[in-house]
Each structure stands twice: as structure tokens, then as C-alpha cells.
């Protein structure tokens, strides 16, 4: 079985706002729980349920973060939102295919989710830390 590494991002270095920070730590827990448990799930319905919860939470988080970027006139908002959208589209695609005969493997989905959050938090969300320091308007 393919080993998927858990996320080990130091979130104390990515402080943006109390709400966003709380969501990031919750998301990290959700993704790591998924990494721990996905190979034990032998029922696609159960996996779909977990993925839906993660998707809903992710969407609420994106909304919050995008509002924050607007409020702070973040110059790269378009590119950042695009990254959120790419994730959303990919997850929607996985959901669409989920019960098909050529459905994606759980490991492929979990692998994508893990890597997306890893890169996104370190690249895009980390940019927002400097933003608050430069424009502490809120
Ligand atoms: Fe983001
Ligand atoms: Fe984020």
C-alpha cells in the first residue's frame, strides 16, 4: 500500500486572523484523520460522507479567506482564488466519478487532497501573513 505522509505544517507561522487560523488547524486535523483512516474504509458511501464534510468545511473556509483578501485589498486575490477554484473543480470531478465503474481510488483522492493543502498553505496562505503585517487595517 502506498504511504501518504501526514501534514506537518507549523501553523504558528501562518497566522492570518483568528477565524482563518482556527479553520486551518481544523482542516489539518481533518486531512490527517483522513490519511490515517482512508485505508480502513471499505464502503464508498462512508468515504463519500467524509469527503463531503471536508469539502463543505473547505468551501466555508475559502469564502472566509476570500472575504479577508478583499477587505485587505490583497493584490494577488485573483490568482489565490483561482487556486481555491482548481481544488473545488477537482473535488467536484472526483465526486462526480465517485460511484462510476472507473471511480478514482481512495488513495488517489487522499493524495491529491494532502498535496493540495500542503502546497496551498505553504505558498498561497503564507503570503497572507505578510499582508496583515503590512496593512494592519483590521
Ligand atoms: Fe487559500
Ligand atoms: Fe486557507
Image (cartoon, helix red, strand yellow):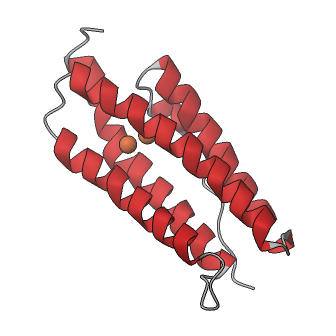
For the N terminus, the image quarter is bottom right
Asked whether residue 83 appears in the rendered view, the answer is: yes
132 up-or-down from 48: above or below: above
Q: Position of residue 4 (x, y in %)?
A: 65, 71
Q: Position of residue 135 (x, y in %)?
A: 20, 16
26 up-or-down from 109: above or below: above
Q: Nearer the viewer, residue 101 or 18?
A: 101
Taking the view exactly as shown, the residue that stands out farthest to the top is 137
**Residue at image coords 62%, 75%:** 98
Taking the view exactly as shown, the residue that stands out farthest to the bottom is 101
Would you say 76 lies left or right of 83 here? left
Query: Which quarter of the figure has residue 26?
Result: top right
**Residue at image coords 27%, 19%:** 133
Query: Which quarter of the figure has residue 63?
Result: top left
Q: Nearer the viewer, residue 72 or 119?
A: 72
Taking the view exactly as shown, the residue that stands out farthest to the left is 75
Asked whether residue 38 appears in the rendered view, the answer is: no
Q: Position of residue 137 (x, y in %)?
A: 24, 8
34 up-or-down from 63: above or below: below
**Residue at image coords 57%, 44%:** 56
Query: Which quarter of the figure has residue 97?
Result: bottom right
112 up-or-down from 83: above or below: below
Amino acid at each position: 500500500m502506498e504511504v501518504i505522509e501526514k501534514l506537518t505544517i507549523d501553523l504558528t507561522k501562518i497566522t492570518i486572523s483568528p477565524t482563518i487560523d482556527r479553520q486551518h488547524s481544523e482542516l489539518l486535523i481533518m486531512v490527517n484523520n483522513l490519511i490515517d483512516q482512508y485505508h480502513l474504509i471499505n464502503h464508498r458511501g462512508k468515504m463519500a460522507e467524509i469527503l463531503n464534510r471536508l469539502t463543505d468545511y473547505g468551501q466555508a473556509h475559502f469564502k472566509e479567506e476570500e472575504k479577508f483578501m478583499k477587505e485587505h485589498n490583497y493584490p494577488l486575490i485573483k490568482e489565490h482564488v483561482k487556486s481555491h477554484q482548481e481544488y473545488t473543480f477537482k473535488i467536484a470531478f472526483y465526486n462526480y466519478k465517485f460511484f462510476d465503474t472507473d471511480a478514482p481510488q481512495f488513495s488517489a483522492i487522499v493524495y491529491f487532497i494532502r498535496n493540495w493543502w500542503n502546497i496551498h498553505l505553504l505558498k498561497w496562505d503564507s503570503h497572507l501573513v505578510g499582508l496583515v503585517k503590512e496593512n494592519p487595517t483590521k
